[in-house]
Image (cartoon, rainbow, N blue to C red):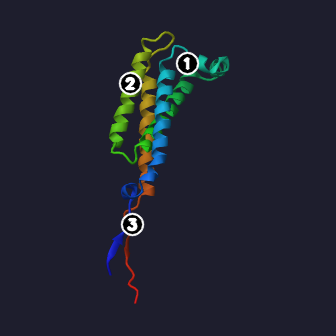
Amino acid sequence: MRATTTPGPTMMHQILPSMRWPYRLIQCVATIYLIVLTLFLVHPDAFSLFGAGAKAAEAGVDATVHGLLQHFSAYFLLGTLLRWAFVGARVSTRTVLIFLVLHGATTETIQAFVPNRTADWRDLLANISGVVASVAVYALCRRWTESPPRIRPEVEHA
């Protein structure tokens, strides 16, 4: 009997290049989200982009907790999108983590120079926490969904 291995995720991309289109779609969505989030974070009055209703709705909630949840959620989603967008590429999780931490630090620094915005270390901590949480969820999902190649004995027909 001769043992064969079933193709893993990387081998599958070599076998079927047409399966790469979902990753291209996720890369486009991640890029658009990164641009929109960056513009939203450096805009002097970001809630005016959504009209007066958003600002009025935020006034009724504790601004500190609400703002931290917004930063955490935004960077969690961005980290998730970017990590899944580059599954088939040779972009490591460490690279995505470093890029997003630098992005969060840069936007917080820029906010110090934008009228009506302030740079806050708690926002930066929420950004980093969202990125780390998304990378951790990604690692757990990959661990649960990836299994080592199964070795199946080939059946000889008589």
The image shows residue 150, relative to residue 134, as above or below, that is: below
Image quadrant holding the C terminus, namely bottom left
Image quadrant holding the N terminus, namely bottom left
**Viewer-nearest of labels 1 and 3?**
3
Which of the numbered marks, if any, corresponds to residue 6?
3
Query: How many other residues sit within 10 Å of disc 2, few (<14), some (14-19) or many (≥20)?
Result: some
Q: Which residue is mark 1?
A: 46
The image shows residue 7, relative to residue 135, as above or below, that is: below
Question: What's under tag 3, amino acid-wise?
Answer: Thr
Question: Distance from label 3 to label 2 (Cα)?
Answer: 43 Å
Question: What's under tag 1, amino acid-wise?
Answer: Ala
| Residue ID at (59%, 19%) | 49
User: Do labels 2 and 1 touch, CB within 8 Å?
Assistant: no
Which residue in the rendered view is the most extreme toward the bottom? 158
Q: Which residue is at the front of the view, 149 or 74?
A: 149
Question: Distance from label 1 to label 3 (Cα)?
Answer: 50 Å
Q: Give the image location of residue 143, x and y in percent.
A: 41, 54
| Residue ID at (38%, 22%) | 106
Is residue 102 visible from the viewing direction of this image?
yes
Q: Which residue is mark 2?
A: 105
Of callouts 1 and 3, the N-terminal one = 3
50 left or right of 130? Answer: right
| Residue ID at (39%, 58%) | 15
